[in-house]
Image (cartoon, helix red, strand yellow):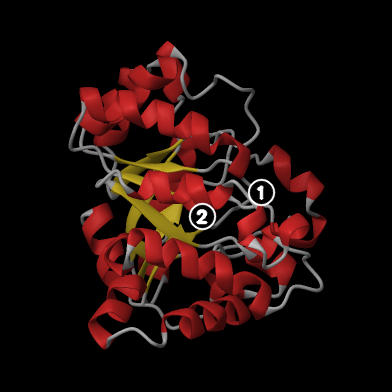
Amino acid sequence: MIDSHLHFWNPEHLTYDWLQYVPAIKGRMGPEEFAGVADLEGAIFVQADCQEAMAEVDWINSLDTSMSWPILGIVAYAPLELGDTQHIQTLKEKPKVVGIRRNAQNEPDGFMTSKGYIAGMVAAAQAGFSLDMCIRARQLPELRQSLDRLFTAAPDARVILDHLGKPDIRIHSADISGDDWANEIKTLSELPNVFCKLSGLPTEADWDHWTPEQLRPWLDHALAAFSPSRCLFGGDWPVVNLAGGYSRWQAVVASAISHLPADQQTEVWSGTARTVYQV
């Protein structure tokens, strides 16, 4: 298994302002704390909104010698809204950086369609980086507009939708028919270079009371829309610890794909990650 969405953080040496709001996971979370959680072939590290973004990349690269499995790629932070090609070019010189993520889930309307943000996306894609998109369900129409402009300028761009676009499972539970998310996911899936990360659903549900039956319709819809060849598993550790833990989430995904042929299950567990991140 390749986990396509793994976080590590080290608040003893780096700064993560948002951790103050989640005290249960605010301590150091590194390879030692992850030991025994899952049996991996490797993982994709995804930036954790660290204030020292370049130092975060350097720290992750320094961990290799202490781990029994490799970090296969790093999805690093870049201030895309600045159209900052210098930052992107600096990342090109860093080992293992394969993608960019500028977390937009808390940004105002219009952020992803701004001139600077589009320019930053295009620059990242043209530099060979994939683009992870972390947004909320209400932002899916705006994402679609920004991707139309991205693919016009960079037709070969590779885009990964994190956490299935964060559907509001707390409100709709298992009834996806009452949520615009389903139509937006179907529309996004019609863009050939967009991939969907099967990650993050437990923390979009009731953290303490969600059931596998509540999460399955959302997974089933994403798998049907994108197909297994464009879906990839993400554990979202250690954030997933807030809502039931890694093994419970992994079991939900395993159940959701258990009816698929073995080769399609392999795509979800590892093959799609190799393709989209080019590792």
Question: Which kind of residue does numbered mark 2 sit on?
Answer: Leu
Q: Compared with residue 7, is residue 264 higher up or lower down, i.e. above or below?
A: below
Which numbered disc covers residue 85?
none
Q: Give the CA distance from mark 1 to mark 2.
A: 28 Å
Compared to residue 116, the image places residue 97 above or below, namely: below
Dot label at residue 164: 2
Asked if residue 14 shows in the view, the reply is no
Question: Which residue does the image show at 69% across and 69% down from the upper left?
Answer: 241
Question: Is 52 on the left-hand or right-hand side of 202?
Answer: left
The percent coordinates of residue 265 (x first, y second) are: 32, 80
Outermost residue to the front: 177
Left of 116 or right of it: where is 235? right
- Residue 253: % across, % down: 50, 77
Q: Position of residue 251 (x, y in %)?
A: 54, 84
Camera-near label (1 vs 2) is: 2
Badge number at residue 11: 1
Most distant residue in the top direction: 115
Q: Nearer the viewer, residue 154 or 237?
A: 154
**Residue 166 at x, y percent in the picture:** 60, 51
Q: Secondary structure at mark 2?
A: helix
